[in-house]
Amino acid sequence: MSYKVVFEKLPENLEELKALPEADLTGPEKAAALTVAALCVFPKNREECYKMLDFLRGPRPLSVMEKNFIRDRFMDGKDYVPMSYFNGTSPDNDYTPSVPYTIEMEDSAAQFAEEGYTRLMIRSSGADSPRSVTLRLKPSTGQYFLWEHQLLVGIRIPKSQDEWA
């Protein structure tokens, strides 16, 4: 199954994220797309990004180690990585997305390997293979929460930063 989530504007803080209809987290695609949107905030406001991710993780907030891991992935000017998941991006246009911001994803072959968890795959325009986001269903609320993601793995650098381009 494939999913498409569209944002007219990307949220810049937790309040804006919570105001989006996807923030009801009633589908795994909603939590996955909001995770990408939250990671886009990191270059401008690290603490706000962490707040947004904590919301998406539900009763399991980020640990200090997880925050450090995210910070480390953004070192060396790799602010473009989360933007690469939106339609219209490419290394040639410095991962500038089309507006409205659209993310497409599909079920993983191992989607229901463990009961209560689902895995979605999101394609980055800078990578050869899609990246996974694992979500956990909270049966008492019917909401999906972020469990883990592989979204900050390296991708091709933007053409404007490529010394060999």
Image (tube, rainbow, N blue to C red):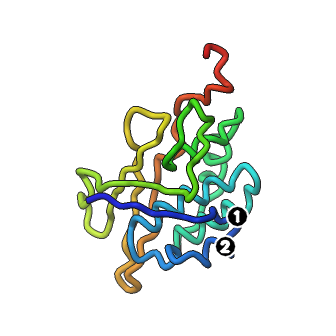
Residue at the image position 72 percent from the left and 63 percent from the top: 48
- Where is mark 1, residue-wise? 12
Horizontal and vertical percent position of residue 27: 38, 72
- The residue carrying pointer 1 sits among few (fewer than 14), some (14 to 19) or many (20 or more) residues within 10 Å by Cα, namely some
Horizontal and vertical percent position of residue 47: 74, 60
Outermost residue toward the bottom in this view: 140
Horizontal and vertical percent position of residue 94: 63, 35
**Disc 2 on helix, strand or loop?**
helix
Residue at the image position 61 percent from the left and 60 percent from the top: 38
Quadrant in which the N terminus is drawn:
bottom left
Q: Which residue is nearer to you in this view: 109 or 136?
A: 109
Name the image quarter holding residue 20: bottom right
- The residue carrying pointer 2 sits among few (fewer than 14), some (14 to 19) or many (20 or more) residues within 10 Å by Cα, namely few
Q: Is residue 117 above or below residue 126?
A: below
Name the image quarter holding residue 106: bottom left
- The residue type indicated by label 2 comes to Glu
- The residue type indicated by label 1 comes to Glu
Q: Is residue 82 above or below residue 100?
A: above
Outermost residue toward the top in this view: 164
| Circles 1, 2 touching at the beta carbon (< 8 Å) | yes
- What number is the disc on residue 116? none
Q: Which residue is nearer to you in this view: 61 or 23?
A: 23
Residue at the image position 62 percent from the left and 26 percent from the top: 159
Q: Is residue 68 above or below residue 55?
A: above
